[in-house]
Structure formats: structure tokens, C-alpha cells
Amino acid sequence: MKITVLANGSYRVVGARQITQLFIQPNAQGLSWSYREGKAFPLQEEGSLLCRCGHSANKPYCDGSHQTTGFDGRVDATRADYFQQAQLQEGPVAALSDAEKLCAFARFCDAGGQIWNLVEQTDAQSIALAVREAEHCPAGRLKVWDIQSQEQISKEPDTQALYLLEDPKLHCSAALWVKAADALDVEGDKPYPVRERMTLCRCGASANKPFCDGSHASIKWQDGL
């Protein structure tokens, strides 16, 4: 699966057969906890264009609205890799690497007193919850490591998939979630380092394009799907 960010235009996706709605589900305390799949939309393996400006009347597909809405699709996000961006927080038995700039505001890191506090604990339950929260973070902002072995204990997805994130709790639609892509290219510019999990902006308002920065929540963007 290869994704190309077209200049002031859409995302061109090659090698994917479908894109699926994925709803963020809260727990009893109202905190992000799990995902529920919704409707699937077909894609052409040889290439499909997905809306990036947020204005298409045929979402998730591009209908050319970016040409008439004054969409500024310039990509300003750093091309530094994850480890160049991340800060490391070391606890007694586990460490947390956190690339805050990648946050897509899905809020899976909040349960149990927040992941930053969980990695400061020594009990297995707290560490297991921290691992779960890191694995559920769609943006790949967070990774949990074992202090002794220095190995990552939060798993990364190895199956390619595309999702349209929906956030009913905040009454808005969210990012385009990309799992295990082979490439993230930019038309006429340098490619981005590929990460196992990426959240791309699809509301058009991110200040960190092509990545989501949570702006969909502040503007209450709805995809209408």
C-alpha cells in the first residue's frame, strides 16, 4: 500500500482494496477504550483518490472540491523520523517514548490515570494498561519499552489497513488512520519516513499536514458518512 500526497490535492492510494469506518468507543467512565467498525468503502488497487480538503460531496473519495474551496494543502510537518521527534520518560520498570507532535487527539492515553503516570508504577497491571493504551493510539505517538531489556513491549500493526476514524464522543469525524503502509510520498517533494501507524488529516484544517493534529475536534468537522 502506497500513499501519495498530491500537491494541494487529494491522497492517491495504491494497493488497498477498501477503507473502513472505525468508531472510537468510550468505556463506562467516558474515556476512549476500544474501536467499532462501520461501513466499508471500496478502493481500486491500481489507485483511488481520497478527499484531503474536507469538502468533497462524495467522501471519502475526492470530487475535486479542493480546486474551488481555496484549500491550502502545503505539507509543513517535519520529515524527522519517530525517534528524532520522541522524548523518553523512564519509569522503574518501563519507559515511554512520546512524539507529542504526532498526537491526533484520540485520547486512548487517558484511562487509568493517563499513560505517563502508569509507566511510573511497578505493578504488572499498570504496565499492561500502559502497553494497551500505546497500542490503541492510532497516530503511533506512544511506545512502551522494557527498562531491563530495552526492547519495545507495545506491539505495532503488521497488517496493512486504512480507516476513517469517527469520534462520537466529541461529535466529530477524525483522521485517516493508516496501518503499515509501504510508502508516504509527496508529489514534487521528498517522501516522509514510513511509520507502522500514521494519522493523516482529512478535515483540511491541520497545521501539521499531512498529519492530523486534532483540529477536527476543535472545528467539529463531520464527514457526513
Image (cartoon, helix red, strand yellow):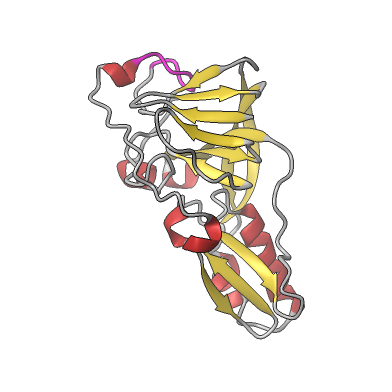
Q: Position of residue 203 (x, y in %)?
A: 38, 34
Q: Main secondary structure of the magenta part?
A: loop
From the viewer's perspective, is residue 163 above or below residue 120?
Answer: above
Numbered-mark total: 0
The magenta-colored residue range is: 57-64
59 vs 148, nearest the viewer: 148
- Residue 122 appears in which quarter of the rendering? bottom right
Q: Which of the pair 134/44 is nearer the observer?
A: 44
Q: Position of residue 105 (x, y in %)?
A: 45, 52
Q: Nearer the viewer, residue 36 or 177?
A: 177
Report the residue at 32% width, 17% height from top: 65
Q: Is residue 114 above or below residue 26?
A: below
> Farthest residue in the left direction?
70
Evaluate whether residue 225 shows in this view.
Answer: no
- Give left or right: position of 148 versus 218: right
Q: Quadrant of the N terminus?
A: top right
Q: Please say whether residue 151 is visible from this viewpoint.
A: yes
Q: Residue at x 36, y 26 (%)?
A: 7
Relative height, residue 127 to residue 138 (above, below): below
Residue at 75 percent of width and 81 percent of height: 148
Spot occupied by residue 91 in the image (x, y as percentages of width and height): 62, 82
Identify the residue shown where x is 25% and y is 17%. Answer: 68
Is 181 covered by the magenta stretch? Answer: no
Query: Where, by quadrant of the figure, is residue 204 drawn?
Result: top left
